Amino acid sequence: MNQNTRNLIIIPALNEEKNLPIVVNSIRESCPDFHIVVIDDGSTDNTKAVAERLGCDVVSLPFNLGIGAAVQTGFLFAKEHGYDIAVQVDADGQHLPEEIGKLIEPIRKDELDVVIGSRYVTTTNYDTPFFRRLGMIILSAVNSLILGKKVTDTTSGFRAYNRKAIHFLAENYPDDYPEPEAIVLLARNGFRIGEVAVSMRKRVTGSSSITPVRSIYYMIKVLLAIFVDIFRKKEIREEHGN
C-alpha cells in the first residue's frame, strides 16, 4: 500500500460530549495522517457541537438508530469519500489511539482485509464483568466453530478495514448489535480476518449501558441472528442448486 493512502477514523457517538475531546486529541497526537468523522447517533447532549468544535467531520443521524446504523453510516462516508483504510474507534475512550498503527499494519502489508483489536489474544489486566465475559466466551466459541478459525474477541469495536471491506460493509453491515455477526458475514464472503493483541482501558467518563441482563439478552439475540443468517444462506444455495 503506497504512502498516499487515505485514512479515516470512524467514531460512532451517543451522548459522549465529555469523552470526545480526550479521544479526538489523542487520535490526532498518535495518528496525524488520519481524518476523523464522528457519527452522532441522535445524541441529546452537545456531542455534535463538541465534535464540530474539535474540527471533525460530523454526520448526524435524525434520531438514535443504534450502533449498527451509526457504524454503517461511517462506512458509507468512507466509501463516498474514497478512503483506503477505515478504523472504528469507540467514543468512550476505551481504545488506545497509539495502538492504531499495530491494527492497520497487516492491512498496509496486504496480509488481511479486516483486523480486530483483541483484549484476549494475550493475558491483559482488562477487567470484564462476569456476565459480559461469559457472553463473549460463548460468542467467540460459536464464531470460531462456524469459521473454523479461533476468534477471541468478537465484540471488540476496535477494528480496521481495507477499501474492499469498507465497500462491502457500506452495503451489508448488520443492524443492532453487529460486531459478532459482521465477523461471520465477512468471513463467509471471503474476507481475510485476523486479530492483534491490544490493551483497553475503562471508559473515561460516564457508564456503560450494558447491564448483566442486557449482556444475556445481547448474547442470545446475536446468536439467533448468526444462525438465522447461516440458515438463510443455506436455503438460498439449495434453491439455486449450489
Image (spheres, helix red, strand yellow):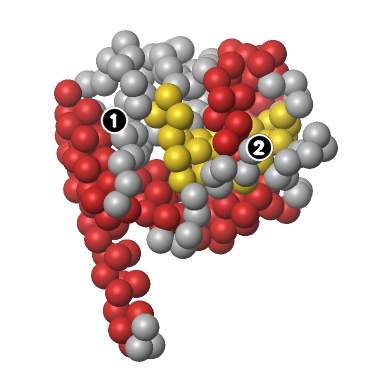
**Does 60 sit above or below residue 93?**
below
User: Considering depth in this image, is 156 or 123 the residue closer to the camera?
Assistant: 123
Q: What's the residue at 62%, 14% (across, down)?
A: 26
Q: In this view, does 62 lie to the left or right of 213?
A: right
Q: What element carries label 2?
A: helix
User: Considering depth in this image, is 112 or 137 the residue closer to the camera?
Assistant: 112
Q: Earlier in the sequence, mark 2 or mark 1?
A: 2
Residue 105, image x, y percentages: 60, 31
Residue 91, image x, y percentages: 52, 26
Rendering quarter of residue 55: top right
Q: Which mark is residue 108?
A: 2
Screen quadrant of the C terminus: bottom left
Q: What residue type is labelled 2?
A: Arg
Q: In this view, does 192 lie to the left or right of 80?
A: left
Q: In this view, does 171 lie to the left or right of 135?
A: right
Residue 186, image x, y percentages: 45, 55
Res 96 seen here: yes
Q: What residue type is labelled 1?
A: Ile
Q: What's the residue at 29%, 30% (across, down)?
A: 210
Q: In this view, does 55 lie to the left or right of 168?
A: right
Res 23 seen here: no
Residue 198, image x, y percentages: 44, 22
Q: What's the residue at 41%, 14% (across, down)?
A: 201
Screen quadrant of the N terminus: top right
Mark 1 sits on what residue?
210
Q: Residue 242 carries which label?
A: none
Rendering quarter of residue 87: top right
